Amino acid sequence: MEGDVVQMGAYIGAGLACTGMGGAAVGVGHVVGNYLSGALRNPSAAGGQIATMFIGIAFSEALGIFSFLVALLLMFAV
Amino acid sequence: MAAESKAAEGAELVFHPMDQFIVKPLFGDGTVNFFTITNVTLWMALTVLAIAGLMVIGTSRRATVPGRMQSIAELAYGFIRKMVEDVAGKDAVPYFPYIMTLFMFIVFSNFLGLLPAAFTTTSHIAVTAVMAVAVFVSVTVIGFVKNGTGFLGLFWIGAAPLPLRPILALIEVISYFVRPVSHSIRLAGNMMAGHAVIKVFAAFAPMVLISLGIGVVVTPLSILAITAIYALETLVAFIQAYVFTILTCVYLKDALHPHH
Amino acid sequence: MATDTTSGAHQAVSACLNEYGGAIGMPQLCGEWFGNQIFWLVVTLLAIFIILSKIALPRIAGVLADRQGAISNDLARAEDLRAEAVEVEKKYEKALSDARAEAQTIIAETKSEIKSQIDDEMASADAEIAVKAAESEKAISEIKAGAIDSVIEVAGDVARDLISAMGAQADRNQVETAVANRMKGRIK
């Protein structure tokens, strides 16, 4: 393996950054799960909140994408 | 990447997950200038053609009882129109064509990008950032034109206790200016991530050619994984277009009705 | 990594590509491609916007409005037809009730006619029967009277024979009177 310490550090950092995606996964699961439990309690109000749920998913997922981006930047751009 | 230098040697797994995002000229090998016709041009043109095919040719019969294409066009129209009216309010209807343009472009780019050997224009930050900044600037301008300085009430939350308001205002201002960043990176990141992951799995697929013993296990698994990720990406392609559009509507609502 | 390319004497067409045409770093961050992408994006968005706002959206809005109009027209026509149907039904009900009433009157008339006829017949039959009964009664009473006379006569004869058998001379008138006295009150 050729390479240097900086490259090694970058790859390790990229791997560590990927753990952030787990947080996003937990967040998305939380949003959808809570939506579902609320929807099962009150199905008549569920339809109107789908858009809100997707906005929540988008926000929490964006953070996972940020960590993915950090990983990519470490791998390819540093 | 280190692997790139070995690309020509054959008999090795070749990882080029990012090569699919390279912008290259369609004709000749010259440098990419401002007006060069590149694969970006090709796939954006295909997007325009597909949208024209669906929305113009598909509806050319103007049938009262719609056919398949016309149904889809009407569905898209009704979907975005309802979203604009529900999320941004009735007074946002004049901006409906702009939002429809964004939605149609993103959704068709995402889906065309899923074709094998396609180039995904929305996976580039340059593209999504232009759209996000355009949304950000126009929403801010609309907010100030419609509400004057009252638009700043968006940052000054009257419902909060007075000592807390400056802090909240700071947070609100920061989150307001982060909007275009997250707005653009969300879309580009999602598209890039999915395509890169598919590519990584695709790089594992020819394992059977290198080592039969490992390949028997790895090759079917990676093909299965490609299929699964592809299905997920089909979902993501639509959801990200939806999310981009609905966030645009949310921002527009903030501009039109800054008082919560 | 970016260091891979700068060393060789290869002819890279772009600072973002290595000698094999592979990407160096993330193609998304290659600044020299931004202008091209942004230019074509703006062109594309303008084209889509013009297509949508000039042709597609008004057309779809028109189609939807037409459909809405057609649906409300059809609904109005259906409403008219329904009213017509209700009208017809009312007429039918009226005709039916009229017919029922007529039938009722006809039945009543027929009934009374039959009743009077029956009454007449009954009356005449009763009269006839009464006449017949009177005749029969008269005949019966005649027969009865005849029978009593013959009984008295026979009784007188028998009494006279009995008396003569006992050797006495019976006076005809006496015997008859005695028999008549005896019979009085027994035969009506």
Image: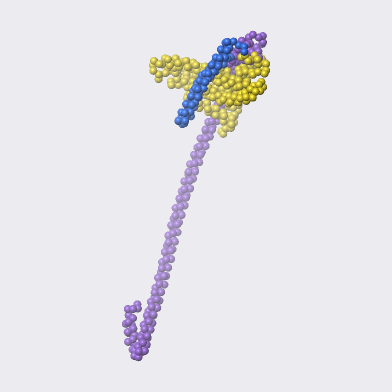
Chain colours: A blue, B yellow, C purple
- Image quadrant in which the N terminus of chain B is located: top right
- Judging depth in this view, the residue of B104 and C18 nearest the camera is C18
Q: Is residue B192 visible?
A: yes
Residue A37 percent coordinates (x, y)? 47, 28
Q: Residue at x 45, y 50 (%)?
A: C97
Residue A16 percent coordinates (x, y)? 54, 16
Where is residue B163, by image quadrant? top left
Q: Is residue B65 above or below residue B19?
A: below
Q: Is residue B208 visible?
A: no
Where is residue A2, by image quadrant? top right
Q: Is residue C3 above or below residue C41?
A: above
- Judging depth in this view, the residue of B39 and B171 nearest the camera is B171
Q: Residue at x 52, y 35 (%)?
A: C71
Q: Residue at x 58, y 32 (%)?
A: B67
How many discs appear? 0
Where is residue B108, by image quadrant? top right
Residue B57 percent coordinates (x, y)? 60, 28
Residue A77 percent coordinates (x, y)? 58, 13
Q: Is residue C158 left or right of residue B88?
A: left
- Image quadrant in which the C terminus of chain B is located: top left
Q: Residue at x 49, y 16 (%)?
A: B178
- Judging depth in this view, the residue of C54 and C187 nearest the camera is C187
Q: Is residue B222 left or right of residue B146?
A: right
Q: Is residue C46 above or below residue C123?
A: above
